Amino acid sequence: MTDNQDVLVAATGLSRYYSEHCAVDRLDVQLHKGEVLGLLGPNGAGKSTTMQMLTGNLAPTAGEIRIRGIDLLDEPRKAKQQIGYLPEQPPVYRDLTVGEYLYYCARLRNVPAAQRKDAVERASERCGLKDVGKRLIGNLSKGYRQRVGIAQAILHNPAVVILDEPTVGLDPIQIREIRRLIRELGREHGIILSTHILPEVQAVCDRVQILNRGKTVFNDTLQGVESLEQVFFDLIFRESDEALSGEEAA
């Protein structure tokens, strides 16, 4: 069994309603140290809503979230110090250089002044940005802007890194580079990434949690799955067929 000290994220019974619509329904999510967890599902499955709740950017209608044992709702500032977050659209300022932006982010993250230079250099090196530190972010390729987004997420050396659709819109070479970076980061951090791309989970994740219609329909390590592709499509199509049958019966 895994030691409780290795549990970085423990979310139980998460639900989120938008008026009458249930986007996330009694979801449990757990992340362990050194693990890369993939939240996999079709568009509209509840992945982004789940990510926003796990990062404290959206309050759950019900449920509890603990980050390294800290209640995210009761002690948000303390819990968020343990989290690095890359939303689907990287929060970068195109009119700043890479270095200027990362220093700015280090200040926002309350990295002590004496440690900011080292923090920026370390994040830049890990994300392959050393050669573009003086370039305007607006002049970088989308792949490099994504790297800058990941760099700001790890500046303060958080225990948990949460990445929402980290390779969306990238070309094949950029996708391969970002996936390699995620695998490297997974050695030191616990990582949760959301995606609707099956090969992404197969390429970088240790465990997959498949969501559909706001619920978990599958949760296992990749080693425990003989054919993830078959499992994924069987579950999604089965859930869709059941939903259609219910609508027709109604």
Image (tube, helix red, strand yellow):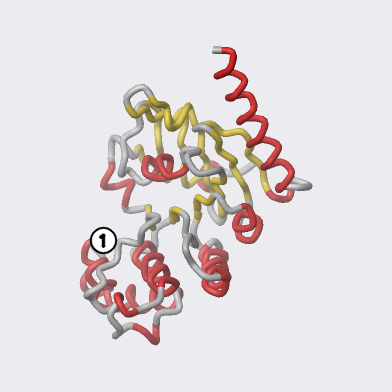
Q: Quadrant of residue 74?
A: top left
66 or 147, which is in the foreground? 147
Write the residue at 46% across / 36% down.
Answer: 11
**Can residue 125 be seen?**
yes
**Residue denoted by label 1:** 109
Q: Amino acid at mark 1?
A: Arg
Q: Can residue 160 be seen from the camera position used here?
A: no
The x, y position of residue 95, in whole percent, is: 22, 75
Secondary structure of the residue carrying tag 1 is: loop
Image quadrant for the C terminus? top right
Tell me: residue 76, above or below residue 168: above
Q: Residue at x 44, y 56 (%)?
A: 161
Q: Quadrant of the N terminus?
A: top right
Task: Looking at this view, name the residue that lies furthest to the front.
Answer: 248
Q: Tell me what residue is drawn at x 55 percent, y 49 percent.
A: 196
Rendering coords of residue 193 (x, y %): 50, 53
Crowding near the residue tagged with mark 1, few <14, some 14–19, many ≥20 C-alpha atoms within 10 Å: some
**In the image, residue 118 lies at what x, y percent?**
33, 77
Among all residues in the image, which is located at the extreme right? 226
Q: Within the image, what quadrant is residue 20 found in? A: top left
User: How many numbered marks appear?
Assistant: 1
Asked if residue 213 is positioned above or below residue 92 in the image, the reply reads above
Is 25 located above or below residue 69 in the figure? above
Residue toward you, 19 or 78: 19
Q: Is residue 7 left or right of residue 201?
A: left
In the rendering, at what x and y percent does residue 30 appear? 52, 41
